[in-house]
Amino acid sequence: MASAPPGTNYATAFGIHSLAAAVIFAILYFPLLGLFVSKAIARPSYIFIILSFFCTIRITAFILRALLADVPADGQNLNMLIAYEIIYNTGFFGLLYSAFTLVADRVAFAKNPPNGLISRLLRMRFLFRIALMAAVAIGITGAIDSSLGTTSSTIDTGNTLRKVAIFIFLVCAALVLLQTIFLARAELSDDGYRGPGEQIGSTYGIYVLMAISLLLVAREAFFAATVDNTTQQNKEAIWYPLAAVTELIAVSLFATPGLVPVRSDISNESNLPVV
């Protein structure tokens, strides 16, 4: 890309065309941001704080995408395209870590929590954070090298790093799904977290959490399946439904009343470490 002739519209070459879709998604995230901020104040939880950050990142990313799609000068700005790609891909950290944290928090309330070796490893939050931070760092480096590289070797290295980041995210999403399955077995057989009142999240929370986990796996599976064909991956006709919509539905499900425990309840309820 860096050696493209002057006047090249990098955004168009990347597959960014629709102004309307980008604007709609930016608008849709605004009420979610307000909701999670209000929940973070009313019922303090790291999850709501992280989700507020995620929504902010998504609003920023879709505003940049709208500018890239509609303003020719911005579409020709390679640095702006790289900034969009980095911001968008970095944001997934927040959504995936929120899902992981929610599973780990609800495990604390299970009367007979999954306690095998795999389950104990999956509850080690610092290892999961390290894996996600590694994926983010590798992905950022890959995006920069593949876009700004001046030699085929640098560009190839960048593309390889992007692939590595995608597969790390996929493995992490699969681990969240696996831990959710373990939690479902525990909650459905011996009861588990029950939020205040007869709320949807109290009664059907594990099903909501399973849906979130499946959506995150589906999102990353799409990127993994198209990792060697970025032209296909970036086609808006499939990118929006398989990447943008799956994320939007997943983050919206976190707003289910009674789904997310507050940190004070976890500390009082559990003998498991909350780290």
Image: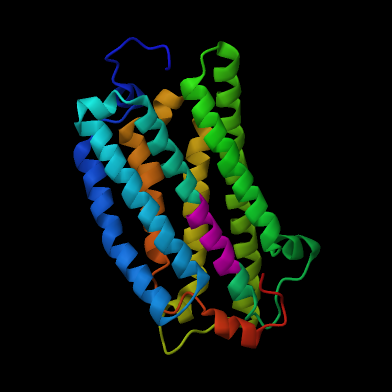
Identify the residue shown where x is 22% and y is 46%. 23
Q: Is residue 29 left or right of residue 215?
A: left
Q: Quadrant of residue 49?
A: bottom left
The reply to whether residue 28 is visible in this rendering is yes
- Tell me which segment is drawn in magenta: 93-103
Q: Is residue 203 left or right of residue 67?
A: right
- Relative to the observer, which residue lies in front, 137 or 160? 137
Point out residue 86 in the picture as x, y percentages from the top left corner: 45, 39
| 40 inside magenta stretch | no
Q: Is residue 163 above or below residue 62?
A: above
Look at the image and tell me in which quarter the N terminus lies: top left
Q: Main secondary structure of the magenta part?
A: helix
Q: Is residue 210 left or right of residue 62?
A: right
Point out residue 187 in the picture as x, y percentages from the top left corner: 61, 77
Q: Is residue 78 above or below residue 65?
A: above
Identify the residue shown where x is 29% and y is 23%. 76
| 95 inside magenta stretch | yes
Point out residue 252 in the picture as x, y percentages from the top left corner: 37, 62
Identify the residue shown where x is 66% and y is 66%. 182
Identify the residue shown where x is 47% and y is 63%. 50
- Relative to the observer, which residue lies in front, 198 or 270? 270
Q: Is residue 90 above or below residue 262?
A: above
- Relative to the observer, which residue lies in front, 228 or 112? 228
Number of labels in the image equals 0
